[in-house]
Image (cartoon, rainbow, N blue to C red):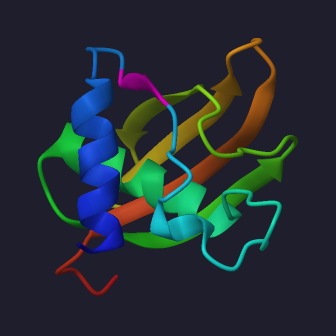
Amino acid sequence: MTIWDEIDNIFDQAGENGEGSCTFSVPGEFSGYRGHFPGNPILPGIVQLSFVRRLAERRLARSLRLAGVKRVKYLRLITPDLPVTLTLALEPGETEGTWAANASFVNGDGGRVSAVKLIFADKESES
């Protein structure tokens, strides 16, 4: 099983709604925790960005690549089995064929975990 299969499985279990948000927890055996950090696992920031991309791909029904990072803020940790809600808002980007993604992770207590603004483009495009 690849990390993408694992992410898809997490999203399938969480479900999605029309606003582009889903609530889930990342199980301790998720491969994204490996080595980060032994004995005190936290979900790496790059894996959080991967979750955003994967949810954007599902919402747009196409394969995407990261074309730019406008903002990334990590405020709290995501640890195994901690419920989080990922909210995603997509809008057309400044360049044709791109999308701006504003996303945030919020924990079960309502505390913002992270917030990002990313630019995605079709995986096949080279711009």
Residue, far front: 39
> Looking at the rendering, which quadrant does residue 94 occupy?
bottom left
State the image coordinates of residue 104 (x, y, percent, origin top left): 63, 34
Image coordinates of residue 96 in percent, x first then y, are 29, 60
- Answer yes or no: is residue 105 visible: yes
* 84 sits left or right of 74 in the view: left
Q: In which quarter of the image is residue 90?
A: top left
Quarter of the figure with residue 126: bottom left
Whether residue 2 is situated above or below residue 75 in the rendered picture: below
The quadrant in which the C terminus is found is bottom left
Q: In this rendering, does residue 56 appear at all?
A: no
Quadrant location, the N terminus: bottom left
Q: In this view, does 38 lie above or below 106?
A: below
Q: What stretch is highlighted in magenta?
A: 20-24
Is residue 21 covered in magenta? yes
Q: Nearer the viewer, residue 51 or 20?
A: 51
Residue at coordinates 45% horizontally, 52% vertically from top-left? 51
Q: Residue 30, percent across and down?
A: 47, 60
Residue 36 painted magenta: no
